[in-house]
Amino acid sequence: MFSRISLLSGAIFMACAATTGVSAQQIAADDQVEWQQNYDSAVRMRVPRSVTPILSQQALNATEEMISRYRDLVARGGWQQMRIATNLRVGSRSQDVSALRQRLIASGDLDPSVGNSPVYDSYVEAGVRRFQARHGLNTTGQMNAATLQAMNVPADIRLKQLEINVVRLRSYSGDLGNRYVIVNIPAAVVETVEGGAVQSRHAAGVGKADRQSPIMNAKITQINFNPFWTVPASIIRKDLIPKMQKDPSYLTDNKIRIYNKSGQELQPQQVNWHSNEATNYMFRQDPGGDINSMGFVRINIPNPYGVYMHDTPAKGVFGDDYRFVSSGCVRLQNVRDYIQWLLKETPGWGRPEIEQTFASGARKDATLRSPVNVYWTYITAWATPDGLVQFRGDIYSRDGLGKLVPVASDEPVPPQEENFYN
C-alpha cells in the first residue's frame, strides 16, 4: 500500500514529464522500481517467525556462532551511544536520523547500501521494526524510550549476555521430551514444542521483580476449568488489606468471599482491616472468566513454589512491552489454543469439548493422559539458525551486568489490571 505522499509525488512527477520531455512511462517505471526496492528492503529486514525452540541444540549452536560474531564486532569498536530524540518516525528529518542509521547498520538491522540520509524513510522504519522485534518490543517502527534504551546497551555488554546465556542453554541440551513447554521469563513468552519444532507461542504475564517467577522444571498434569481462586497469604497481606482500607466494597465488587477456619462465611465488615486479622482467614474468589483472577482456566503444575499457569480477564497486558505484572504465576494469551495442544492426547477433550466447558461455566477438571514437561527458564540472549540474535531485559538482575531492565510503559495501568495478582 502506497502512502498518500507517494501518490501525490507521483502525480507531480507526471505533470513535470510533460514539460521536460521525459516520458510518463519512464517515470512510472522508475517509480515502480523505487517502490519495489522499498518493499524488498522491508521484506529483507523483517524478522521471520522461527520454529526453533529457545531450548534446543539448534539454538545452542547458533548462539555459540553468534558469540564469535559479537567478539569480532566488539573488537571493531561495537556501536556508538546515541543521544537522539525518542519521537522520530516516518517523515522526520534530522541529523538524529543519520545517527540512527549508523546504529542500525552496526547491529545488522539496516543494509549499509541505503546511505546516510537524514530522512526517516521506509528503510529506517523497517530497520527499527527489525531491531524492536529482536529485543521483544512492540514493532511500531517508531523510536521511543524503550527502543533507545535497548540501542544504547554497549556491544561488549551484549557479548557478555550471550556468553552468560550460552551456559544456561547448555544446561538444557539433553532430552527435554518429544512434547514440552518453555516459559522464558525475561522474554515473557511461552512456547509449545513438539517434534523439535515450536507449535505455538503465547505472550505471557510473569512475576514482578519483587515477586519473581521461579526457575524450575516440572510437569503439567491437569486443567481446571472455571476455577475458584484461593488468595495466597502473601497477597492478603500485601494487597487485599490495603485495598480494603481504601475501598470497603472491594471484596464484594470482585466476588471474593471470606471464610473462617470452621468454613463459615464472614462479611467484610466483620474483619478489622486496620490490623493483620485478615491473614487468619481464607479468601476465595467465585468462578467466572469475566472477573476471576484465573479467568476461565488454571493449568496445574505440581511444584514446591505453589505457582501455576492460568488465563486472565485482564487481556490488555499482552499488548505491552513490559509484562512483569504477576505475583509469580504465569498468565497466558490465547489460552484456548494452549490447552487444546496440552489435551490433544487426552481422549474426550477436543476443541468442541473445551469450548463447551468454557461456555457452561461449570467447574470441571481434565487430567492429562500423559503429563507434559514444562521448563521455567531465564534466558536473556539467544540466537537462531537463520542468523538472528535476540536480547531481553535482565528483569531479575541475574546476569550481573548492571541495569538491563526494560523501560515500563509511561501509560497508567487501567484500574481492572490492579484487581488481578497471580
Image: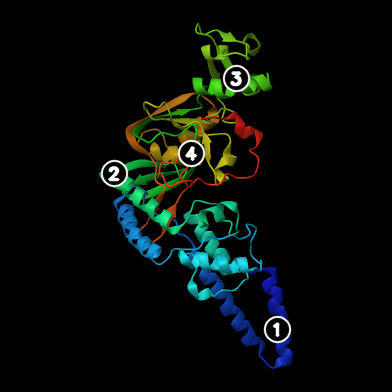
- Residue shown at 51% from the left, 65% from the top: 104
- Which mark's residue is nearer the viewer, 4 or 1? 1
Q: Please rate how many residues cluster around mark 4, counting C-alpha atoms within 10 Å: few if below 14, some from 14 to 19, many from 20.
A: some
Residue 1 visible in the picture: no
Q: Is residue 362 above or below residue 43?
A: above
Determine contact: label 1, label 2, CB under 8 Å: no
Nearest to the observer: residue 299 or residue 400: 400
- Residue shown at 66% from the left, 90% from the top: 23
Which residue in the protein does label 1 denote?
Answer: 14
Residue 75 visible in the picture: yes
Which residue in the protein does label 3 denote?
Answer: 241
Disc 4 residue type (three-letter): Arg
Residue 308's disc is: none
Task: Tell me: 300 left or right of 235.
Answer: left
Q: Earlier in the sequence, mark 3 or mark 4?
A: 3
As drawn, the residue found furthest toward the bottom would be: 21
Which residue in the protein does label 4 denote?
Answer: 336
Q: Please rate how many residues cluster around mark 1, counting C-alpha atoms within 10 Å: few if below 14, some from 14 to 19, many from 20.
A: some
- Which mark's residue is nearer the viewer, 3 or 1? 3
Nearest to the observer: residue 242 or residue 198: 242
Task: Estimate the spatial distance between the alpha carbons at disc 3 and disc 4, rounded to whole Å.
Answer: 33 Å
Which residue in the protein does label 2 denote?
Answer: 171
Task: Tell me: 350 left or right of 168.
Answer: right
Task: Tell me: 170 left or right of 316.
Answer: left
Q: Is residue 289 above or below residue 103?
A: above
